Amino acid sequence: MARQMPPVDVVIVGMGWTGGIAARELAGTGLRIVGLERGRFRDTIPDFTAPNALDELRYSVRGDMFQDLSKETVTFRNAPNETALPMRRLGAFLPGTGLGGAGMHWNGQTYRFQPADFQLRSHIEKRYGKDRIDDDLSIQDWGVTYDELEPSYDKFEYVCGISGKAGNVQGKIQAGGNPFEGPRQRDYPTPPLNIGYAGSLFSETARSLGYHPFPTPAANLSQAYVNPDGVELGVCTYCGFCERFGCYNWSKSSPLNTVLPIAMRNPNFELRCEAHVTRVNMSKDGKTATGVTYVDANGIETFQPAALVLLCAFQFHNVRLMLVSGIGKPYDPAKGEGVVGRNFAYQTVASVVTFFEDKRFNTFAGAGAMGPTMDDFNSDNFDHDKVDFIGGGYLAVHTTGARPITQVHLPPGTPRWGAKWKQALHQWYDRSFAIGCQGSSMARKQNYIDIDPTYRDIYGVPLARMTFDFAPNDIRMREFLIDKMIGIAKALKPTHMMASRPPVPFSIVPYQTTHVTGGAIMGTDPQTSAVNRYLQSWDVPNVFSIGASAFPQNAGYNPTDTVGALAYWSLDAIKSRYLPNPGKLM
C-alpha cells in the first residue's frame, strides 16, 4: 500500500517552464501547493558554474541533462501496421529531466506564433477553400486567438527579459523588426543581441533579394535586466554553450532564474525532487482526480491527495499520464474517435550549409538565438495559391557556437575519419555556416500517441507509443523552403554548399528538434479536443494539462514562447474563474 501524504490544494506534476509558472502564479493565493519533479534538484551554483558547465562531452554528447532512457522511454513506429520498438538512445528529440526541465537546455529562440496559426483550419478554408487541405490532415483551430493570448505573450517575454526588436507595435510596422508578426502592445524588454559576420552577411543578401530579415527574439539577454518580480538576469557573454547546456551567467532565461525563485519563497509551496509520478488517482466514478501517485528517491510509492492537479510535464509525459489514468477517451485512428493522443505533431526542418575559402566567421562566439530570421515564407505570409501545400517556416542563420565535437561542418565528399578528415577540419573550421529552416508540422490522422501493449518503464507503467511520419504536405513544404534557402545560398557565392534534410520516412535516430507537440490538444469541442480553451480536461474538471501537448498542430516556429503564453493564459483562468467556483469552465 502506498504511503499517504497530508492533502494539499494543488499538486503540480513537472517543474519546468509550465510548472514553474504555475507555482509562481499561485504563490499569492494562500493555497497549499506541492510541486513534483522526477529529476534531481539543481541550481546555477553549484551545477552550472564555469568552466564545468562548458563540457561538450558531458552535456551535448552524453546528455547529462536529458531523460534517462534506462528508466523510462517511448516506443516508436511510422505507421499503425508496424510494431513499435523502444527508443534506446536519445536521437530525434531531447526531453529534459531535473529541476527546470527542458527549459534549462533550450537555445532561447522565443517566437510568437502568427494570428493565422491559431485559426488555421478556418483561415485556410476561408482564404483558399476546403479542398486545399489534404484529406489525411486533421488540423483545427485552437479555440483561442492571438489577440486573446497577446497579454500572456507579453507577460512571458517580460518575465524572461527577451531581447529583440518589435516589428508591429499596436498595428504600426516598426523598422528593423518582423513586419509579418501580429500586433504587440509594446517592444521587447531588452534590445536585440549582436549579430555576427555570418548573420550580417545573410541579412545583407536576403535584403538584396527583397526579403525581410530581423533579429531573432532571444532569451539570451543582450544586457543586464531586472524582471517584474525583481529577479536579476545577466548579460550574455556569447560563449556558444546554450543548446544542451545550462547557463553559468544567469543570462539565458530559464525556470531556475525567473519563476522558480519567486515560487520557492512562498511558505505554502513545497518542492519535491526525485518524485516520479506514475498516475493520476481518480474517484470511483472516474469524474474527479483525487491526487497523484509517485515514487520517491528511496523507491517508496507515495500518494499525494490534492484538490487540483496540474499536469505540467513534457509533452508526451502529459499525454501518457492522461492515458494511463483514464482521463479522457483515447484516440482510435481506425474509427476516427477519441481525443487523448490525437494530433501528435513535430517540426519539419532542413538546412543548407555554405563554405567559404576566403572568409572566417568567428562562429565560436555565439548564443542560442544569435542571428537573423526571416518570415517571408512562414505561416500564411505568402500566397499559397501558387504552391501545393499549406503552412511554411522561417529561414535563419543562428550562430550558436562552433563546438568541435557536434558543430563542425565539412564539405561534401569529406571522409568521416583519418588524415584527410583532419586536413579538411583544419581547412574549413570557422569557414562555414548553415541557413536553417524550422517548418510547420500539420496534424495528421495517422500520427498519434497511445499506450504500448508490450513495453513498460522501471515502475511497471506502460510506455507511451508514438506513431508518426511526415505528412506529404509537409514534405512538399520542406522542399519549397530548401529551394528558397538554396537561392539565398547561391547569392552568397560560397565555395561549396550542401543541402541537408532528415530522412524520409521519419527516423527517430538523428537529432532534428525537441519540438514535439499535441496529444492532449485544446479546442472548443469535446469531440475533437482533450482539453478546453483554458487547458482544462473536458472529462475531469480538476485536471489541467498545460504545455505543448495542447497544440492542435505545430507552426513554423520554436514553441517555447507559446508554451509560456498558454501557461499564463490557463493560470489566469484558474485564479479568476476556477478557484472561486471549482468546476467546468466551459
Image (spheres, rainbow, N blue to C red):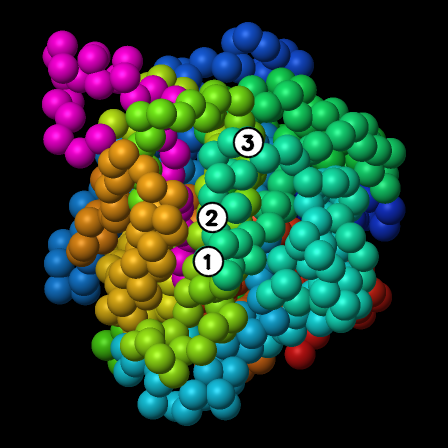
Above or below, comparing residue 347 to residue 62 in the picture: below
| In the displayed structure image, the side of residue 142 where residue 345 appears, left or right | left
Q: Which mark is residue 209?
A: 1
At 40% from the left and 78% from the top, the residue drawn is 384
Q: Which residue is mark 2?
A: 205
Q: Where are the magenta residues, as a range?
A: 411-440
Single out the mark in the foreground, 2 or 3: 2
Label 3 sits on what residue type? Gly
State whether residue 530 appears in this view: no
Q: Secondary structure at mark 1?
A: loop
Percent of width and height locating residue 314: 49, 46
Labels 2 and 3: the sequence-earlier one: 3
Q: Secondary structure at mark 2?
A: helix
In reply to whether residue 403 is colored magenta, the answer given is no
At 71% from the left and 71% from the top, the residue drawn is 147
Above or below, comparing residue 57 to residue 274 in the picture: above
